[in-house]
Amino acid sequence: MKRNIIRRVGALLLAGAMMTVSASAAAQPKPFDAEHPYAAPVTGMFHEQAVDGGVYSVYLPESLDQCVDGILIAVPDGTTAEAFTQSSLGEEWLRVSEAHGVALAFAEPASGGEWNLDGSGGRDEAAYLKAVSDNFHNKSENLDAAFDLNERAFYVVGYEEGGVAAQEFVMAWPALICGAVSVDGYAVPDEMMDEIGDALSYPFVQAGSMEGQQENQLPNNEIPVPVWLIASDDAAQNNENVASYWIAANNAQDAASNTYASGVYENGPARVWLTDAEDAAEVTPEIMYTEFLSGVQRFVGDPGGRLAFTVSHENNGETGFFYSEEKVNGVIRRWYTYVPSSYTGEEDVPLVLAIHGYSSSIDAFTGDSRWQDVAEEHGFIVVFPQAYMSRPVMGNINAPVWNTYSFALGEDAVDDVVFLEQLIALTEERYSIDSERIYATGHSNGSTMTWALGLDATELFAAIAPVGHNSGARRGSATRDEALAPTEHLSASTPENDPELLLPVWSFKGEYDVDGGPELTAGSTNLEAMQVWTARNGVSAAPSATSTDSTGRYQTSAYTAADSNVPLVQYTVVENSPHAYLPEEAEMIWEEFFSKYSRAADGSLYYEGQLVEKSEQTQFTDLDGHWAQTRRQKMQSHRAG
């Protein structure tokens, strides 16, 4: 007899603050709390959230932070999302949500009736679940339950008939999903499986459009997704072909059974677990999340969304990841410091700042860029700083954003250049850092932060590598707070920022990237950046050489001075990539660029140990009234005083 999870459990409401139920009224963001600046502005339970095809519920726990995991749960036939959240099983999921700071969405069959599992004469369930997913990914302040989802950590769970609907959704949009669990049955009809599986997949996690679909020609059934299938005791509710589908999609091989699954197939993070009906009761929501779902992420920049195990932010007391949360310039800031196992403190080592993008986080960027792996291999320290929360930008709720020159954040925005200057100084106090070998790189909004550091704190860096967004000088009417906070960690002997100082830059843009893609067209930020930085570094305005790496994916233009082979400016187009920062780029940036440059205490630049002299063929002229000019004057005044 088929187990009926919802119908046999009693309704049990959570007590206290964990569950504040509200209807579909506009959510009221909480007042900003400077003592807890990274807390989510909206929390609670939100029912009757509407999309084309139906409604759904969202639960945002009180423990919610920024750029967090999200789970979409499809409930069984004969129940609503709201009723599910009030069951004892729903209670278990809400406890998982609070314990781990995970956002939950609950999707239901049309009008609480039956899921249309064979695709005939009813709602398009994959389209409905995609609409729920789209809202779940959306930070718009117009949504009742907007929050900051980590798109690299989006998972799907389904129960009974909802498990079948969930499987069909995952088969239709595999590159969006990092793991799925189907509980008490997974009888996807063979015809549906064939139809969905043979269709072309959207190739990238960022499924805002269909760019790259026709170029990549990736069938859905070739995109790996970690899947856990938990059988029903009613054999008619299972379909062995579903297991075969996912084993093939994951290219997974037979492996040893484990505590929870008698059938296990693995291919690194791509895996399939099969659990018999008699063992199903042992698999709780806590186990699903901690033992299976949360262990895998996707890289958003590869076609099909290459899977990877999530990063464990641990240390042994001396090396590894070290988390810091402390006040800098009067506001609470966060960062990770990664110390490689080779570090002893007896020798100075290089330092890299790795800066995440808008609405991202230090946890997400360690997963995206894997700079810690490069640091471990080459023996340097890498710091991952966290952006501060801003007032809404782009119509979104408050989210982490760097105060650069792309967003008009207002005069109350924190000065992130000063923060990062002081973070470098703090790191130099706590570790043995080679001050001649400090570098910065970042993605998207973190890329524009990297450009800002290059313009505003040139003297601190031997080279910079912005990825995914370009900037030459300040554009438009964006403003920043020019008031300098106390800078007691800055050395009075530090050379002043000088636009005549050489600063090597290497910029990356993806084929399907934002802000006009990678084209160097008139009026684009890409061309503007090349014009400003080739002039500033005294190199040719046109590429001196072009090259393609051994994979054929990275096409690089190098700009050098006459009679020189020093690539002071480089521009790389990443073939078949959207708006992303890939681990391969971190490796390239270190091995082919950062590791070759150093800056002496007097500001002189060296390439592979040889002094680099500025060519007189072109000179950078600072703009009268430019933001950097004003800031330099204030910095000089402060340091002199």
Image (cartoon, rainbow, N blue to C red):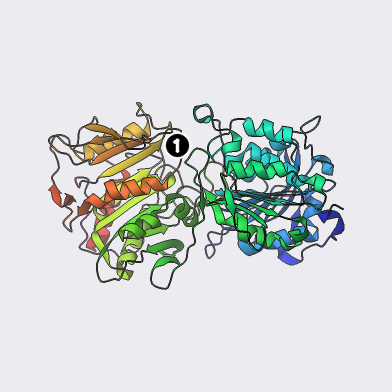
- Residue 36 vs 23, above or below: the answer is below
Membership of 432 in magenta stretch:
no
Q: Look at the magenta stretch and give its main secondary structure.
A: loop
Q: Percent from the top left, x then y, of residue 204?
A: 53, 38
The part of the image, by quadrant, that contains residue 171 is top right
The structure residue drawn at horizontal position 31% and vertical position 50%, both measured from the top left corner, is 590
The span picked out in magenta is: 476-503
The structure residue drawn at horizontal position 45% and vertical position 57%, both measured from the top left corner, is 386
Answer with left or right where residue 215 lies relative to residue 459: right
Answer with left or right where residue 581 lies relative to residue 146: left
Answer with left or right where residue 423 lies relative to residue 364: left
**Quadrant where the C terminus is found in the figure:** bottom left
Q: Percent from the top left, x then y, of residue 22?
A: 75, 53
Asked if residue 418 can be seen in this view, the reply is: no
Asked if residue 609 can be seen in this view, the reply is: yes
The structure residue drawn at horizontal position 42% and vertical position 57%, both measured from the top left corner, is 385
Question: The disc labelled 1 sits on which kind of residue?
Answer: Ser
Answer with left or right where residue 138 lies relative to residue 457: right
Dot 1 falls on a residue whose secondary structure is loop
Q: Would you name the residue on which mark 1 appears?
A: 577
- Residue 419 vs 622, above or below: the answer is below
Which residue ends up furthest to the bottom in the rendered image?
A: 317
Q: Percent from the top left, x then y, of residue 467?
A: 38, 43
